[in-house]
Image (cartoon, rainbow, N blue to C red):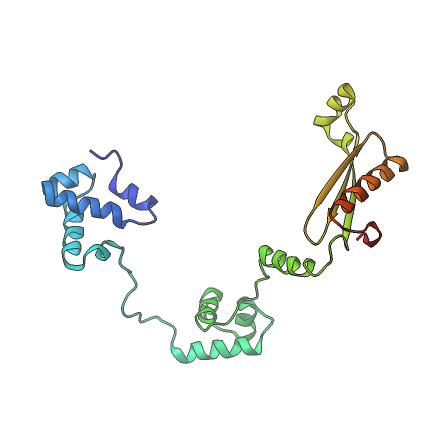
Amino acid sequence: MCPYQYYQVMRQSKDKKPWRYQMVQKTLEIGVKPTATLFHTSPSVVRTWRDRFETEGYSGLADRSHKPHHSPRATPQYIKDHIIKLKSKYKRLGAEQVRVLEDLPQAPKTMRKIWRDAGIPSRKRPKKHATKNNLRAVKKLFELYAQSMEDTKDLMDIPEYYLQAKMLNLPQVQYTHREVSCGILLTGFANNLLTSSLFKNLRDLRIKMEKTGASFLMLSYI
């Protein structure tokens, strides 16, 4: 016997057809009522999906739309056309502002749906990943090591690291160099913020750049 209730499985399933198909196949083997008991549902539900499978096949096991064939309170087409024209008039305003200015009885949600069905784009800002992709396209135009970023981090500001650094004599400063065009990240560590430590890290950076064929003279910071 299945340990889960039929309706519980239906609420959590993204594709309900495989589960209903198993129920139909079990119905053909042992009958309607035993199958209803096995799947924790009513015999009428079992008969419904059995009949739909027999007439429509596997595709008939999908949920059917409950949308009415006729809606007497649907927005008339001439009102939809008027709302669509208002979007051209108020290009920078949203549904709430247009509704107030034109004194429309339709709800803002209804107006947005009419605009969406008409293919009018929304005023939403581009998603973050789209902005990142745009920046990547710009960064690819830079030559290698033409634009770089340098950062200095005082590691002693980290509470979890402070005690270990004091006991084990660990580095207290982190130097980070990032190449903009391809994202190469180079790090260096020192025990102080003195200029000599910075020059040491720059010297190490120059050695790493020469290994890649880049010139240290072309390096610039942003």
Q: Is residue 220 left or right of residue 123?
A: right
Residue at image coords 56%, 74%:
101
Residue at image coords 73%, 54%:
144
Whether residue 166 is situated above or below residue 125 in the rendered picture: above
Whether residue 38 is situated above or below residue 128 in the rendered picture: above
Residue at the limit of the structure toward the top, as seen here:
167
Residue at image coords 33%, 46%:
13
Q: Is residue 111 left or right of residue 145?
A: left
Whether residue 210 is situated above or below residue 172 in the rendered picture: below
Whether residue 30 is situated above or below residue 126 in the rendered picture: above
Residue at image coords 74%, 38%:
187
Q: Measuring from the top left, give residue 76's x and y in whole percent.
A: 38, 77
Quarter of the image holding residue 168?
A: top right
Q: Is residue 61 left or right of residue 194?
A: left
Q: Measuring from the top left, give residue 69's x and y in whole percent.
A: 27, 68
Quarter of the image holding residue 123?
A: bottom right
Quadrant in which the N terminus appears: top left
**Nearest to the observer: residue 100 or residue 92:** 92
Q: Measuring from the top left, give residue 210's x and y in whole percent.
A: 78, 46
Looking at the rendered structure, the number of numbered marks drawn on it comes to 0
**Nearest to the observer: residue 78 or residue 203:** 203
Q: Measuring from the top left, give residue 92's x and y in whole percent.
A: 60, 71
Quarter of the image holding residue 177?
A: top right
